[in-house]
Image (cartoon, rainbow, N blue to C red):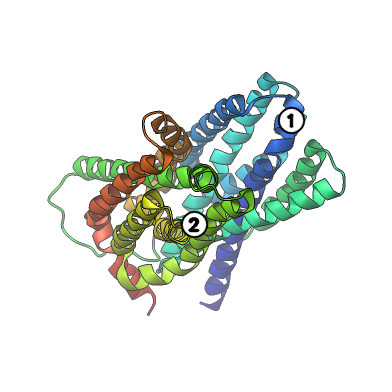
Amino acid sequence: MGSMDGSLRDARVATYAYFVLYGTLLGTWVVHIPAIEERVGISHATLGGLLVVLGLGAFTGMQVAGPLTDRLGTRTVVPAGGVLCGATLFLPGLAHDPWTLAGALLVFGFCNGCLDVSMNAHAIHVEKAYGRPVMSGFHATFSIGGVLAALAGAATAGAGLRPAAGMAAIGAAGIVIALASARALLSAAPATQSPAPARESTTSPDDERRGTTGRVWLLAVLALMVMLCEGAANDWSALHMKDVLGAPAGTAAFAYGTFAAAMTVGRLLADRVVTRFGSMAILRHGAVVAAVGVTLVALGPPTWAVFAGWALLGLGLSGCVPQLFSAAGHADPTAAGANVSRVAGLGYVGMLAGPAVIGWLTRLVPLDHAFFLLTLLCVTTAVGARVLRTGPERARPREMAAGRH
């Protein structure tokens, strides 16, 4: 029993490592965007279009990696995704025109999508084996990876390295971490760790499968709405402070920092909340808190109220995406990868669409009024949270609670 506990603990640590790795590799690209934009000689508008190519690659990678993870196992696909991400990180730094940058981002995005879905599928296996919620903690370490990327990017820039060289060095370190962490991963989904209680079913397997598929797509729609709000906050929080409230650039930057910090803290605490109150409660009440927060931002202008609003939005959204991913994976453990790829893929579309949708709305209404769309999406998510209490998900909080004893 002690050996099993040790291997499970090692698998959890390895999963943390992959989430930090993913956050670091993706963050490394983000912190080098200004230098690469200058090297390639493109405008902000052109860069925006190229970021869509990155998203297209990621979405495609998610759809490929999901079924592949179910077929080959996370112990094979997760390290492969990590190695591919590390190996392709330097490609955008070599780009010399928009076309080569588009190709580099398409390849790098595809590898990102593969790692994203496969590591989330493995995180669900670990959560199932533990018998209690641990998913939000994994997502919190992704944010920590972004901080490490900023520090690493500053170090490589300070050393005088060109973007491609700095990104190659970090990518090489990522490959080593991906390979070193691979042996600790679970070899298969622990289907016997927290079995669902036996019960007679009056529905056919095909009906149950269709019901599960429909539930997963509902989760995907909720993920799209939640991640659209997150994407909008990422790209518009600082601009809102600067352009609408007239705050200095330094103060405006703290708007995003407040949102990101609140989201990280919320994810560090969310697993305990889920254990006590259940996933539906954290999705419903989290979405309500997020709605209140973004409404405060939209109503402004007291600066303190806007900062409080961004903090509440980050705190409210923090536990939502991990619960949606977890619910998708637990809906059918034999197809965890495919189900997570659907939820993550549509959610990623929302993340990319968020900034563009808000930007389009600013042609019709002021920026602060455009944020009311996010309020509507958060309220809709709160109403739709009951999907976490349907079918197999109804029993999951009780099963996990029993697994703690």
* Residue 109 in which image quadrant: top right
Looking at the picture, how far across and down is residue 232, in whole percent? Answer: 46, 43
Depicted 50 relative to depicted 2: above or below: above
Foreground pick, 44 / 185: 44
Q: Viewed as shown, does residue 254 lie left or right of 199?
A: right
User: Dot 1: few (<14), some (14–19), or many (≥20) neighbours within 10 Å?
Assistant: few
- Disc 1 residue type? Glu
Depicted 87 relative to depicted 133: above or below: above
Q: Let me know if residue 371 appears in the view.
A: yes
* Residue 292 in which image quadrant: bottom left
Looking at the picture, how far across and down is residue 268, in whole percent? Answer: 50, 67
Q: Residue furthest right?
A: 160
Give the spatial CA distance, label 2 vs label 1: 38 Å
User: Dot 2: few (<14), some (14–19), or many (≥20) neighbours within 10 Å?
Assistant: many
In the picture of the structure, the residue carrying the numbered disc 2 is: 123
Foreground pick, 247 / 10: 247
Q: Let me know if residue 387 appears in the view.
A: no
Q: Nearer the viewer's eye, disc 2 or disc 1?
A: 1
Looking at the picture, how far across and down is residue 319, in whole percent? Answer: 41, 59
In the picture, the disc for residue 38 is: 1
Looking at the picture, how far across and down is residue 337, in whole percent? Answer: 44, 45
- The residue shown at (36%, 50%) is 328
- The residue shown at (58%, 26%) is 45
In the picture, the disc for residue 388 is: none
| SS state under label 1 | helix
